[in-house]
Image (cartoon, helix red, strand yellow):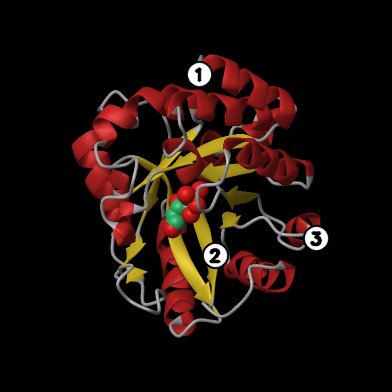
Amino acid sequence: MSWGLSNRLNRVLPGLASGTGSVMFAIDHGYFMGPTTGLEDPKKTIVPLLPHGDSLMLTRGILKSCIPKECKLPIVLRVSSGNSILNDDMSNEKLCVSTEDAIRLNASAVAFSIYVGAEYEHQTLVEFSKLINEAHRYGIPVLAVTAVGKNMDRDLRYLSLASRIAAELGADMIKTYYCEDFSRLVNVCHVPVVIAGGKKIPEADALQLAHNAISDGAAGVDMGRNIFQAESPSDMIQAVRSVVVEGVSPEDAYKNYKSSLR
Ligand code: R5P
């Protein structure tokens, strides 16, 4: 790994060096979901939350139009797209942002979705591999966003299949979903694994999810809806951070969260 790639990776996931988890704040949902609840006005709702994240995952459109130029967070730029929630099969994605543009936008990493077991599996895996060739030429780490076919359970079997394939193809970090026996998935990947939060669940459950993932070896969370759709997004990102980075128990983090609402 080149010094530049290693340095960028450690800025995106600072917990790798400090031995804690890291908080990647994900707000890229609009690339296929449009005006997602909580992200309608990112300048107003998201910018105040930035000081509490370690890195920010988003599209180039929102980066350019809504994120202040003085933003200090390392940017994880989504570079795959080509689909919307209107399609039954969501896997028809390709590389849509050049590495040149990622560099121009000062991205610290790029993120690409692979769809293992889905209709366009082959296309996404080949495009992903080509992205790695290109991004690594410039020392830019690649985050694999793993998805599995629409009829497959998000369980250890399929999630570890998708995650290990991503690692074999050269991913520098992997985003997947938490599942039973998650530590077994982490153990077969050999690169840092972060978990997505998934659909909005009660805040106490989201904090427990974050705790379980870190306890099972995740390098952090790549969390979006459970932060920006929380009753108080600002308090929620701080609660997530307390669990993931400071090791606060999910029960105490939830108590702190509830008391900060009053
Ligand atoms: C999903 O397509 C996006 O890549 C999200 O960044 C990712 O799923 C994390 O967001 P959430 O915690 O809302 O699932």
Is the residue at mark 1 in contact range of ligand 1, meaning its CB lies under 8 Å from it? no
The answer to which quarter of the image holds residue 39 is: top left
Task: Report whether residue 139 is seen.
Answer: no
Q: Residue at x 64, y 73 (%)?
A: 153
Q: What distance separates the C-alpha of mark 1 from that of mark 3?
A: 37 Å
Instruction: Give the residue type at disc 1.
Output: Leu
Select label 1 or label 3 by which is in front. Answer: 1
- From this view, report whether residue 57 is shown above or below residue 15: below
Residue 187 coordinates in the image, percent (x, y): 79, 58
Q: Residue at x 73, y 67 (%)?
A: 156
> What kind of element bears circle 1?
helix
- From this view, report whether residue 203 is shown above or below residue 242: below
Instruction: Give the residue type at disc 2.
Output: Thr
The residue that disc 2 covers is 146
**211 lies left or right of 64:** right
Q: What distance separates the C-alpha of mark 3 from that of mark 2?
A: 16 Å
The answer to which quarter of the image holds residue 250 is: top right
Residue 126 coordinates in the image, percent (x, y): 45, 78
Instruction: Give the residue type at disc 3.
Output: Arg
The residue that disc 1 covers is 261
**117 lies left or right of 85:** right
The residue that disc 3 covers is 184
- Count how many numbered circles sit on residues in the image: 3
**32 lies left or right of 220:** left
